[in-house]
Image: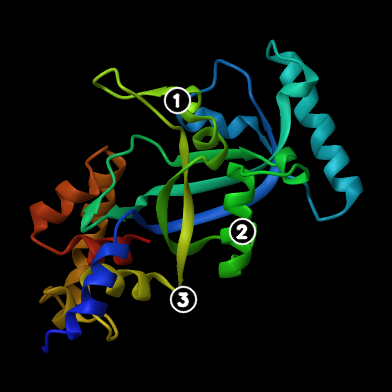
Amino acid sequence: MSYWDQAAAGAKEESGGGVIGKARIDLGYFVFVSGFAGDERGKCIFLPDDETKEARTVARQAAQQFAIANGGESRSARWCAITTLYKDHCTRGSELVSWQNDRLETVPLWTLHQDGPSAAQLLMDQINELGVSGGVDFFGQFTWRTDPYAESLGDAGKTETDDDGQLYYPGLYVPVRLFADVNEARNFITGSSTETSTETTGNAWDDATWEAVLPEMRELKESGTSLKDIADGYEVPLPELLKRLK
């Protein structure tokens, strides 16, 4: 490799951060009320059945009724872009993410009608630039970005606190790259540009061997064993395990 070849190589390494894996982005109403955490937050989502105003009205009314029934107000139901990152199908680097639940991010969209920077505008700009399909699962790379509106407020916008008690700006994961399928995502993680095979993953098992052990792996997963521990225990690459268990 020549000196200048590293220009592109370094750029790829720099952009290879964040989270890579399976996700989806929906448009719908999210009800901001207390008492729902982890996977329970899914109960706060109300998606229209189609893209018509009538369907949005039905979803909004259901969300408002849910809000009132759970101690909130009708305005607690907000029209949002709702991003779901599936914990069992997302990696940071070569390691499976350590989230306890699927990551659910909600971005209210009312600021799209206002001038100035906002998290909603940032997310929608990325969605439109990449051509993300809404309401369906896809594979992509997500990078953490600071909320531009919060940042525009200076120190007053630092409303989150880290483990050391330091204030920082809130933010969100936004898509920065799309992959055709899980193979392309896995190849991006491993640095391979070829179709995934036992040669690119380092796994020497054939399909018959995988089929023989997959029931045991699924039982371990259902019992609460992390996918990383399963991969380590069977000495197989985590990306290949993700593919087989999808």
User: Which color scheme does this rendered protein use?
Assistant: rainbow
Q: Observer-nearest residue: 80 or 222?
A: 80
Counting from the top left corner in percent of width and height, residue 225 is at 22, 41
Name the foreground residue: 135 vs 127: 127
What residue does disc 1 label?
155
Locate residue 77 relative to residue 244 in the image: left or right. Answer: right
* Residue 28 x, y percent position in the rendering: 71, 43
> Few, some or many C-alpha atoms within 10 Å of disc 3 (few <14, some 14-19, many ≥20)?
few
Q: Position of residue 31 (x, y in %)?
A: 67, 27
- In-front residue for pair 190/16: 16
**Residue 137 shown left or right of residue 158 in the figure:** right
Q: Which mark is residue 125?
A: 2
Question: Where 45 falls versus 20 (above or below)?
Answer: above
User: At 63% across and 64% down in the image, what residue appears?
Assistant: 128
- Split into 4 quadrants, where in the image is the C terminus? bottom left
Q: Quadrant of residue 133?
A: bottom right
- Residue visible at 46% across and 62% down? 176
Q: Nearer the viewer, mark 3 or mark 2?
A: 2
Q: Which of the two discs, 1 and 2, sits closer to the camera?
A: 1
Label 1 CA crowd tier, 10 Å (few <14, some 14–19, many 20+)? few
